[in-house]
Amino acid sequence: MMIDLRSDTVTRPTPGMREAMLDAPVGDDVWGDDPSVAALEAILAERAGYPSALFFPSGTQSNLAALMSHCGRGDEFIAGQYSHIYRDEGGGAAVLGGIQPQPIEQDANGCLPLDKVEAAVKGEDIHHARTRLIALENTFRGKVLSQDHVERLVNFAAEHGLATHLDGARLFNACVETGQPLSALCTGFDSVSVCFSKGLGAPVGSLLMGGEAFIAQARRWRKTLGGGMRQAGILAAGCRYALEHQVERLADDHRHARLLAEGLSQIDEVEVLACDTNMVFIEIPECHREELKIFLQMQGVLIAVSTRLRLVTHLDVREDDIRYVIRCIGDYFAGQRV
Ligand SMILES: *Cc1c(COP(=O)(O)O)cnc(C)c1O
């Protein structure tokens, strides 16, 4: 078995999760008949403090349905330049929703500077798209957003009549890191999307939460986008199992990431740029990037390589694996020095 640090999406369902999925009562969820989906939606809506929730096959589709439910053709949403919803979802809002993105350069903490947001909000004028929504992301590159920042932006949006959406693909990581309940980190947002297929370890599934009319609209868009699933309770049961058994253990991933960052910082050629929740970003001399990746692969370790290397801890990475990876990377550079 490889030690796979490319992403926390690579987790495989645990035996307990597989059992829960096998035993799930199911029905046709497009007809509203699936008790396992309905239960998951109700449990999460309650826990996050929203009237309604809706199960999606992916976070991308959940975010897109949210944008299409908040905004119409010729509307615009404000989001971070490096946010997933703007940069990593195939431009879906523009392609499929007729919604224009207005990206904002983020600061080092992933925050959207309020003055830049304010300057980007367009007044009523036939020349402009209509600014409708601000979208935030928590965690962003592993970083937990400061609640101060969130509050300021949510208040700003309210004052300007803008809706707010939170891409909380890894919001449970933020909960575990801060000790805050899910509802506290959702406060003020009109809608929130969370993923179960990342650190929580489910094979498939995201949930969108919001008000009743909003979720009814999102249900229409989900069908249009091809996300209406039939006996989806099998998947929802995996997510429910994750919610009940695999949230608190995210703390292990965060501890493992710190351990990894500490170990790697002892190696001269490695610069640790950031370590937040379950992600470690490092820089190494460019000439070593591809070679290190190949070396590690031969040692049974997978990493994704771009300008900054991102190493992600998750359910299928144990403390021993972390020590082994540190040793392998140390060995690689020691071998280069002789
Ligand atoms: C993974 C992720 C999503 C959704 O991705 P899917 O692969 O479509 O589930 C959305 N936002 C962020 C920040 C993510 O990391």
Image (cartoon, helix red, strand yellow):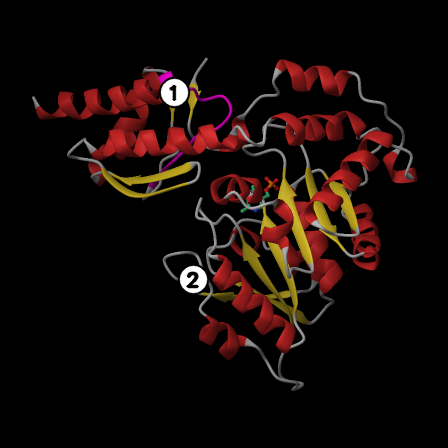
Residue 231, horizontal then vertical, whole percent: 84, 28
Left or right: where 88 falls relative to 66: left
Residue 233, horizontal then vertical, whole percent: 80, 28
Identify the residue position indicated by label 1 in the image. Answer: 319
Q: Is residue 130 visible?
A: no
Image point (19%, 31%), residue name: 266
Residue 67 found in image quarter: bottom right
Judge by depth and name the residue closer to the eye, 39 or 310. 39
Image point (31%, 20%), residue name: 323
Dot in front, 1 or 2: 1
Above or below residue 137? Residue 323 is: above
Left or right: where 140 falls relative to 57: left
Amino acid type of the residue that numbered disc 2 sits on in the rendered structure: Gln
Residue 106 numbered mark, or none: 2
**Highlighted range, magenta:** 309-321
Above or below residue 32? Residue 267 is: above
Above or below residue 224? Residue 244 is: above
Q: Is residue 235 magenta?
A: no
Judge by depth and name the residue closer to the eye, 224 or 57. 57
Disc 1 crowd rating (10 Å Cα; few below 14, some 14-19, many 20+) is some
Residue 267, horizontal then vertical, whole percent: 18, 31
Numbered disc 1: secondary structure: helix
Numbered disc 2: secondary structure: loop
Amino acid type of the residue that numbered disc 1 sits on in the rendered structure: Glu
Image point (34%, 34%), residue name: 258
